[in-house]
Amino acid sequence: MGERSEIGDRYETLRRRIKEELENEQNGVPTIRITMSTCARAAGAEETRKAIEDAIAAFGLSAKIIPVGCLGHCYAEPLIILDYPTTGLPPICYHSVNAGKARLIIQSYLQESDPAFEYIMGAMEENDLIPPVTTFPRFGLEERIVMTHCGRINPWDIREYIANDGYSALAAALTDLPERIIDEVEKSGLRGRGGAGFPTGRKWRLGRAQESNRKVVICNADEGDPGAYMDRTIIESNPHQLLEGIAICAYAVGADTAIIYIRAEYPLAVKTIEQAIREAKAYGFLGERILGSDFSLDVKIFQGSGAFVCGEETALIQSIEGRRGMPQHRPPYPVERGLWGYPTIVNNVKTFSYVPSIINKGAEWFQSIGTERSPGTAIFSIVGNVKHPGLVEVAMGTTLRTLIFDICGGIANKKTFKAVQIGGPSGGCLSEVFLDTPIDFDSLTQVGAMMGSGGMVVMDEDSCMVDVARYFLDFTQKESCGKCTFCRIGTKHLLDILDRITRGKGQEEDLKILEDLSRDIKQGSLCGLGKTAPNPVITSIRYFFDEYVAHVRDKRCPALKCRSLIAYYIDLERCARGCEACVGSCPVEAIFTTKGRKKAIDQSLCVKCGECMVACPKEYDAVLRVSPPELAPIIERPPMR
Amino acid sequence: MVKITVDGKKLETEEHLTVLEACLQNGIFIPNLCFLKTRPHPHASCRLCFVSIEGYDRPITACTERVRDGLVVKTDTPEVRALQRSAFKLLMSLHPCNAKLCPTEKPCLLMRIAKHIGVGINPKPLERINRGLPDFVDFGSLYYVPNRCVLCARCIHTCRSINKRPLLTFAKRGIMTMVAYFSSGNDSEVCSNCNACVDICPVAALLPKSAFINFLEAKETHA
Ligand SMILES: Cc1cc2nc3c(=O)[nH]c(=O)nc-3n(C[C@H](O)[C@H](O)[C@H](O)COP(=O)(O)O)c2cc1C
Ligand code: SF4
Ligand code: FES
């Protein structure tokens, strides 16, 4: 037992030292935390940071600027959290802080001790003066495990993670038996967050049971779904939590090598994790004889070149081995024979990131969150037509309605909800009647969607479901590795038929072909890509059948989206005499002047770009769209002179 | 030896065989294009060898399943046939059959498969897909006919493992995936004209240049 308590002591001493170090550094000086993740940078965080630095210098203030990751409120980036302890106020969060606002806030708060109430989003702690952010439904309804520290701690400074008890789970794990760690993870009911929801504890137990002189742990950070960015954000915001989870897994299964497979298109995430690995090594949490124990772990990074299919575990392994990323028939599963033939445990970024909390707080605590069969939380990146897109972590079992309407503020621009696509390109499109479906692995699969890796696209009334299915099939068809017949050729046929339907060339028989072929591709494909690729087609036909029928039978697009099936025309009642706003907007000069100096569209020239509709002044709103195109009144163009 | 039942017939087969091999050895035909005995891990790409096995709720590929005592296999259930026909039609939608120009011995393997599963060699109701690929691609000492190729990868495996030459590989993705020829110019990496790939190809998509001259001639006289 001597060695065991030594590990604990060693960790405790380190943590105490670091806490003191950080307190001394702060020493009453205001700190400005600014979100510097990829999403924040896209919103101008670099300029904001520069403005803050300049303002501090200009006013001769002393303050510490600390970069942090993403808070999840991507609609409000860049965010800053200002902590000025001597004012007696709690840390305050400001949203949408551009360079100008940043200067004002610094001047007002740091110079004049007035916290600039008009820009405040909320206080980060409960208090009597400033309403806390938790009064926002977004903060209040979320339940954070993995994202607890995201956007709050500096991902570039391991000490902030340690000061928040980081790596204490690893220290505890190392004083325990590997089997006990696996028991705990298994009891917690944690299921893989990479898509299929395989029980993590069971996978680890299988890994532990393999007889081999070497085992490998792989962290799957390929994240190929278009529109999904949870894994990137988690790495950019709290890389050490991930590393800690990986190290605990490696210890539990008996691996000495871990590889983080991350796509090269994530340069900031790659840099963040590289730096985190260096720091963790320097502090003795990775590398040789971790925390003085007998356990050593070498963590490497492998940059993938961004093929969607390389997220599939067998293709991912092929890719690391230097081969073409093509999925292989399973069994053998990677856990039996994986990278270089060794037993290999593949888990998603989020899966690993839950592990430290589970070890620290126990399996029962984790079980108590979420639903019985899907314990814990779900992390979604929500994009599309919602008011407040971003990254959200909610307890499993939360309904889609709560997520979309309460947490994300509902549909933007006063439009109505039409559909939500869950699970990435191979997920399903659900209609309004499914809004009360609880979010968990089994409920989503039951209605034809899936948890996937956590991408969610919300669509309003202007989306055409045939067109949406076509969009996703275009993606999967291009990303098919080309190996097996069903996926390689079948998805192309699905795409061609959908394409034909959106162009008004579809037949009623096409719907039957789509359904039959979708069923066969799902059953017959070799890997998960093909097995799920038809989901958008199957669900959109099932839940939006009328829309398909309108396209093939009446050559009509009810959402007025499919160009071949619509026409633009100008309502002469509304068109203002002599107004020329639309004329110049038309790229093909299809707009001409007709009776009463009003305007009309020459249908033979119109390319249906919709520019005139945008150009027409709001008060007239005279450009209209109809489907089928024959409904547009025909106005003869006077012969040109 | 293990005892299995296929379509009601009791068979005794060697251990370690796949269901596909066991059936073929006993004269029971299961459509297949990508199976190769020498491949340690089944490629399982053609998706034609489906069978129904008791205990599984859906058809599975016979080339990936090993025989076990008491296995009960059916090779012609409606579900099996539906998948096979579907896969076959997909393949045929990229493989315009031009029997006169094709050097395979007739009936070719594809024709035999079509007959076995009860479909024509056209892709109906699917349309034919024209990928705009050339009629043939120059592979040095060979010609490759992309519109015939069914991407079984038998040539790639044969070239690599039997001849220890990494000259053939897959190129491109999705529907445009093709076999490609790649040589760094090193002596050990030059085609030795062994024609092993030509012999292993089930659909005459690889031809020695000499044979190909006839093909071109035939095409001209045809046109
Ligand atoms: C086409 C395809 C793409 C995938 N992409 C990812 C991905 O980007 N990230 C991921 O973690 N898992 C992905 N997976 C799932 C992995 O194959 C694997 O199941 C997962 O990484 C296991 O981790 P988990 O048990 O933690 O979920 C993908 C699967 C398929 C079929
Ligand atoms: S060329 Fe022939 S052997 Fe090679 S992949 Fe194509 S069909 Fe198979
Ligand atoms: S022979 Fe089994 S999939 Fe091709």
Image: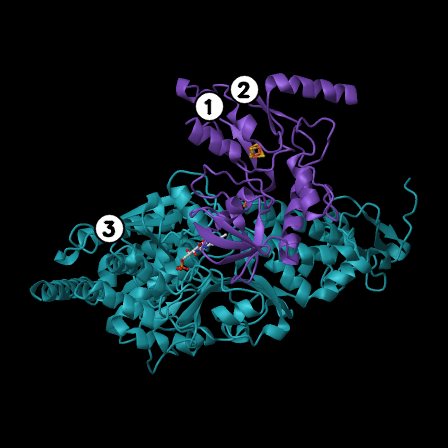
Chain colours: A cyan, B purple
The count of marks equals: 3
Label 3 resides on the chain identified as A
Between A324 and A77, the one nearer to me in the picture: A324
Q: Quadrant of residue A420?
A: bottom right
Per the image, the residue denoted by label 1 is: B183
Amino acid found under the numbered disc labelled 1: Ser
* Labelled disc at residue A256: 3
Q: Splitting the image into 4 quarters, where does residue A458 fall?
A: bottom right
Left/right of residue A354 with respect to residue A193 in the rendered view: left
Identify which amino acid the numbered label 3 is placed on: Asp
Q: Locate the N terminus of chain A and report the quarter of the image it occupies.
A: bottom left
Viewer-proximal residue, B103 or A469?
Answer: B103
Q: Chain of mark 1?
A: B
- Which is nearer the eye, A61 or A191? A191
At horizontal 73% and vertical 30% (from top left) the residue drawn is B99
Q: Secondary structure at mark 1?
A: loop
